[in-house]
């Protein structure tokens, strides 16, 4: 049997090999759940509850405003820039109801980064949270025409004993630009949208992912590609499920697990805007949370909480995620304290989250899992694209219904991302792995240049491009350094311009980085060097620097 089919013996019991998925617009899932369970709680936000009927009504008001006041038409891209919140979820489906395309943006991004998203996507309208509006507002003079401003405290409707973060509790502030409108005023307009015109093959969501060019690229996902992982991941929710949404909803893993799949299954979602291990435990106890989607770094922090035994966590039936291999000691502690095995998975923005997952009844440690329904995943020689035998390391390529249509406006990058094998297009993941004797996939290394900082992908070329804006920097090369909490962190090897040497410190560059790029991208370590190694063609030999860093780790 080919290595790509060894896993089929270990599909969960009673699981089909082919999954029938609704061939409909994603918004139809809202209509169905609201019709079937109108009073059922969908969102719980610091003890405020929003049911399915109210959720549908508010999404329709958003869509009506977008169409009638903002001039949004079918296929237009709309930026969504905020933390986990009721407004994020309502806006997401309001944009879809208007037949527009959601462009989810990391709320940690700053103005220089946001400028690229606005220009590249062509978005004229954006939703932004009040606390981060100043970062986006300058772009009203550079392409954006309207911003809807959300105040998180608008949805703090009942008293709560949760410790609400200051940025969530902050009252609504006055807006001083006619091109901005308060969320509450948008809903108060009470405008109705037109009929849904889009179908399964129209664009729905366009998350951005970075690459070796240094410029983030929009992954084009249709209603069909998003719908597949909405309906087709093992350990799926049901009407009785309660999830904890603490993974960022702008990221495809959180988006699929705690938004799209939750609506599809009419589940309840308890929202936390940011990770807080005590707040998470309190939510689990109070709302009898049944499922947690957590990256490895969150599990490590959660299990190290000295107060963990004070909470009743007995309702949790499944913890799954990814982002980095789970340390064996933490996995063992989780099994001993909670009686649960961590369900690791594997996916990308290009595949709208998972292509692989560990079967819930038969997981393996530090393992990507096995291909999901209808996914053809192979290990190939990166040079020849020939499939390799079981046990040999090569590049993962995937073909499946959740794979993106391509990169927005970048036909050349799209062509480079795919390879045809046996008449089918396969996405080149750039990740190296091998398949064991039972068909489980195990990660080995990255073919592409990327840093995994606590689950966030950091592309060195993008960070380098931002560093070059500093007047003191002549050259910079960004590599991964080991970090006990983040797994990897960002390290910049910097050559200063001659007239700036001795005039600027490493810490000053670290501080500058935090002011000019998202915190997870900003270098935590800066090292001054006299020169960077170059190849015969003048290219910086980043791999040599990375290997030297890896050797220093091993000898430390």
Image (cartoon, rainbow, N blue to C red):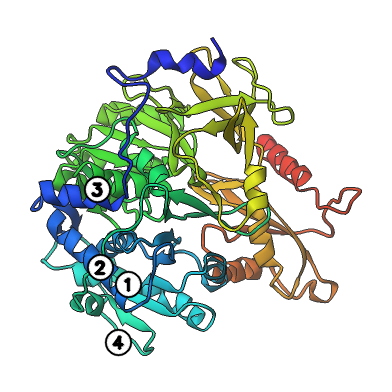
The quadrant in which the C terminus is found is top right
Of callouts 2 and 4, the N-terminal one: 4
Q: From this viewpoint, which residue is outermost toward the left?
A: 39
Q: Which mark is residue 174?
A: 4
Mark 2 vs mark 4: in front: 2
Of callouts 1 and 4, the N-terminal one: 1
Disc 2 secondary structure class: loop
Disc 1 secondary structure class: helix
Residue hosting label 1: 67
Find residue 11 and report its horizontal and vertical position in percent. Answer: 37, 19
| Left or right: 162, with 329 as reference point | left
Disc 4 secondary structure class: loop
**Between marks 4 and 3, how big is the CA–CA gap?**
36 Å
Q: Are marks 3 and 2 in contact (CB under 8 Å)?
A: no
**Between marks 2 and 1, how big is the CA–CA gap?**
7 Å
Find residue 506 and report its horizontal and vertical position in percent. Answer: 68, 65
Of callouts 2 and 1, the N-terminal one: 1
Find residue 176 and report its horizontal and vertical position in percent. Answer: 36, 90
In front here: 101 or 437?
101
Count of residue discs: 4
**Between marks 3 and 2, how big is the CA–CA gap?**
17 Å
Q: Are marks 4 and 3 in contact (CB under 8 Å)?
A: no
**Between marks 1 and 4, how big is the CA–CA gap?**
25 Å
Q: Are marks 2 and 4 in contact (CB under 8 Å)?
A: no
Find residue 128 and report its horizontal and vertical position in percent. Answer: 38, 71
Disc 3 secondary structure class: helix
Q: Are marks 2 and 1 in contact (CB under 8 Å)?
A: yes
Residue hosting label 2: 193
Q: Which mark is residue 29?
A: 3
Of callouts 3 and 2, the N-terminal one: 3
């Amino acid at each position: 049997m080919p290595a790509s089919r060894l896993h089929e013996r270990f599909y969960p019991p009673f699981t089909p090999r082919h999954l029938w998925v609704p061939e409909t617009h994603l918004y139809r899932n809202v209509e169905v759940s609201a019709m079937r369970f109108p009073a059922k709680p969908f969102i719980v936000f610091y003890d405020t509850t929003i049911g399915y009927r109210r959720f549908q009504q508010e999404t329709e008001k958003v869509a009506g405003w977008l169409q009638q006041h903002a001039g949004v038409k079918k296929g237009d891209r709309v930026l969504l820039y905020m933390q986990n919140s009721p407004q994020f979820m309502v806006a997401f489906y309001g944009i879809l109801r208007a037949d527009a395309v959601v462009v989810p943006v990391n709320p940690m991004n700053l103005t220089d980064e946001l400028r690229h998203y606005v220009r590249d996507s062509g978005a004229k309208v954006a939703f932004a949270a009040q606390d981060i509006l100043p970062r986006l507002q300058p772009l009203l003079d550079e392409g954006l025409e309207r911003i809807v401003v959300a105040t998180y405290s608008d949805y703090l409707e009942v008293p709560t004993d949760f410790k609400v973060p200051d940025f969530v509790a902050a009252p609504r502030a006055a807006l001083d630009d006619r091109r901005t409108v308060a969320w509450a005023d948008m809903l108060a307009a009470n405008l109705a949208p037109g009929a849904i015109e889009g179908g399964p093959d129209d664009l729905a969501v366009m998350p951005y992912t970075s690459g070796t060019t240094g410029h983030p690229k929009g992954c084009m996902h249709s209603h069909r590609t998003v719908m597949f992982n909405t309906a087709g991941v093992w350990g799926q929710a049901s009407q009785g499920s309660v999830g904890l949404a603490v993974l960022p909803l702008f990221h495809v893993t959180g988006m699929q697990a705690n938004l799209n799949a939750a609506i599809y299954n009419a589940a309840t979602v308890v929202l936390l805007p940011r990770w807080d291990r005590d707040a998470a435990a309190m939510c689990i106890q109070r709302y009898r949370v049944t499922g947690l989607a957590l990256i490895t770094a969150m599990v490590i922090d959660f299990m190290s909480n000295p107060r963990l035994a004070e909470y009743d966590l007995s309702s949790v039936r499944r913890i799954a995620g990814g982002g980095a291999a789970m340390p064996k000691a933490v996995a063992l502690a989780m099994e001993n304290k909670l009686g649960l095995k961590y369900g690791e998975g594997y996916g990308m923005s290009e595949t709208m989250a998972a292509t692989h997952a560990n079967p819930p009844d038969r997981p393996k440690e530090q393992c990507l899992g096995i291909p999901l329904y209808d996914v053809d995943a192979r290990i190939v020689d990166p040079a020849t694209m020939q499939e390799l035998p079981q046990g040999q390391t090569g590049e993962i390529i995937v073909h499946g219904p959740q794979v993106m249509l391509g990169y927005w406006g970048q036909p050349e990058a799209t062509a480079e991302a795919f390879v045809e094998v046996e008449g089918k297009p396969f996405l080149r993941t750039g990740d190296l792995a091998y398949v064991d004797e039972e068909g489980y996939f195990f990660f080995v290394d990255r073919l592409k240049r990327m840093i995994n900082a606590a689950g966030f992908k950091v592309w060195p070329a993008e960070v380098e491009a931002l560093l070059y804006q500093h007047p003191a920097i002549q050259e910079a090369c960004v590599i991964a350094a080991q970090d006990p909490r983040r797994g990897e962190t960002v390290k910049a090897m910097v050559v200063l311009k001659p007239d700036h040497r001795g005039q600027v410190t490493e810490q000053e560059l670290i501080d500058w980085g935090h002011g000019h790029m998202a915190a997870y991208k900003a270098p935590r370590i800066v090292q001054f060097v006299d020169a960077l190694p170059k190849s015969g063609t003048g290219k910086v030999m980043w791999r040599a620097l990375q290997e030297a860093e890896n050797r220093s780790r091993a000898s430390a």
